Amino acid sequence: MAGVLLRFVLPHAHPDTGVEEGVFRTAYTLRDSPGTRPQDQAALKDLLSWFEANFALPKRFNSSKSKGYYRRKTAGISWLKSTAFEHIAKMRLLVAILESNGFQISQVSTDRPGYVVFEDDHQVVAEPFRRETKRGQLS
């Protein structure tokens, strides 16, 4: 793994990881909300379908080597590689819709995501180091 990694996050911590929550859960909730504008629902549906088709879903999100790894609390954080240009462009479209619906989204970056548990051409999933600090910056 080399280079800078990116995340798009909300200003509150995820209960399992303690770091700022990513945008996908909010995007799905907004897509399915009856109060969301139809054009935003349609755009979110298209974008989320694109991500489902173009993002590998890792089998695990923790670094445990035990046979019961699937019972452990999920701790892995997904990061986009800075070379995943199409994924980043689609993510920016998703973020724009969320922001137009009142959500505050920030972009954070690191070159030290933690203990890598999955990696492909587009993303890295890593358990943050214990000394994780606020705003996605790792110490």
Image (tube, rainbow, N blue to C red):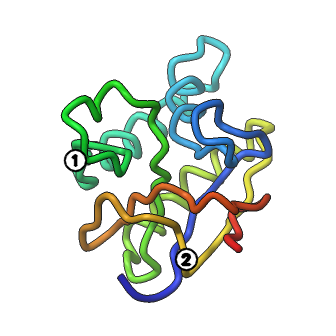
In this rendering, position of residue 22 left or right of residue 55: right
Q: Which residue is mark 2?
A: 112
Q: Farthest residue in the top direction?
A: 34
Q: Is residue 52 above or below residue 7?
A: above
Front-most of 137 and 62? 62
Mark 1: few/some/many CA within 10 Å (<14, 14-19, 20+): few
Mark 2 lies on a secondary structure that is: loop
In this rendering, position of residue 51 left or right of residue 54: right
x, y percent for residue 96:
65, 53
Which one is earlier in the sequence, the residue at label 2 or at label 1?
Answer: 1
x, y percent for residue 71:
34, 24
Mark 1 lies on a secondary structure that is: helix
Q: Farthest residue in the bottom direction?
A: 3
x, y percent for residue 134:
79, 58
The structure residue drawn at horizontal position 74% and vertical position 44%, both measured from the top left corner, is 100
Q: Amino acid at mark 2?
A: Arg
Q: Is residue 104 above or below residue 33?
A: below
Specify the quadrant of the image occupied by residue 137. bottom right
Q: Which residue is mark 1?
A: 53
In this rendering, position of residue 91 left or right of residue 97: left
Q: Amino acid at mark 1?
A: Ala
